[in-house]
Image: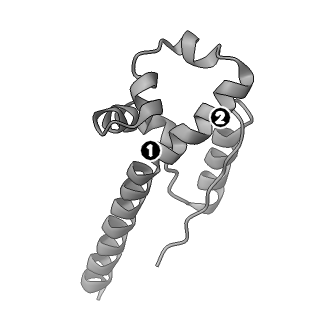
C-alpha cells in the first residue's frame, strides 16, 4: 500500500514549490490538483453542485476578486464539492502503480 501526503494552504503560499522539491528529493509522485480543477469544476457543475455551477460562469478575475470572507467560504465549499473527483483520481493512480509493481516483480525474476 502506498502512503499519500497532502499539502494544503492558501493560494501562493508555496505548496507547489514544496511538493516539487519533495517529489524530486524522495522520488514521490506529485499529484497537482490544480491541473485538474477545470475538469472537476465542470463535472461538479453537471452534477448540480452550487459552487461549481457558479464558478463555471465566472472569469478568473471575478473568482479571485470576491470579498475575502465570501471567497474563503466558497473555496472550502468548492473543495468539498470536488473532493470525490480528487479522491477517485488518486485511488485510480494508486491502483495503477500497485499493478505496475506486481508486474515488475513478476518479470524481475
Identify whether 18 is placed above or below 99.
above
Q: Secondary structure at mark 2?
A: helix
Q: Left or right: where does residue 56 sit relative to residue 3?
A: left
Q: Left or right: where does residue 67 sit relative to residue 55?
A: right
Residue 67 found in image quarter: top right
Q: Residue at x 70, y 30 (%)?
A: 12
Residue 100 found in image quarter: bottom left
**Number of numbered labels in the structure image:** 2
Residue 1 marker = none
Q: Secondary structure at mark 1?
A: helix
> Residue 106: x and y, percent?
26, 85
Q: Write down the residue under mark 1.
A: 82
Identify whether 66 is placed above or below 32.
above
Quarter containing the C terminus? bottom left
Which is nearer the eye, 106 or 8? 8
Residue 73 marker = 2
> Residue 95: x and y, percent?
33, 69
Q: Residue at x 56, y 18 (%)?
A: 63
Amino acid at each position: 500500500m502506498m502512503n499519500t501526503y497532502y499539502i494544503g494552504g492558501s493560494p501562493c503560499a508555496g505548496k507547489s514549490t514544496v511538493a516539487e522539491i519533495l517529489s524530486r528529493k524522495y522520488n514521490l509522485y506529485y499529484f497537482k490538483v490544480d491541473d485538474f480543477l477545470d475538469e472537476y469544476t465542470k463535472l461538479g457543475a453537471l452534477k448540480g453542485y452550487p459552487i461549481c455551477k457558479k464558478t463555471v460562469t465566472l472569469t478568473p478575475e471575478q473568482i479571485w476578486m470576491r470579498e475575502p470572507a465570501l471567497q474563503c467560504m466558497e473555496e472550502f465549499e468548492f473543495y468539498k464539492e470536488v473532493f470525490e473527483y480528487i479522491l477517485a483520481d488518486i485511488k485510480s493512480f494508486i491502483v495503477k502503480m500497485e499493478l505496475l509493481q506486481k508486474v515488475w516483480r513478476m518479470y524481475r525474476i
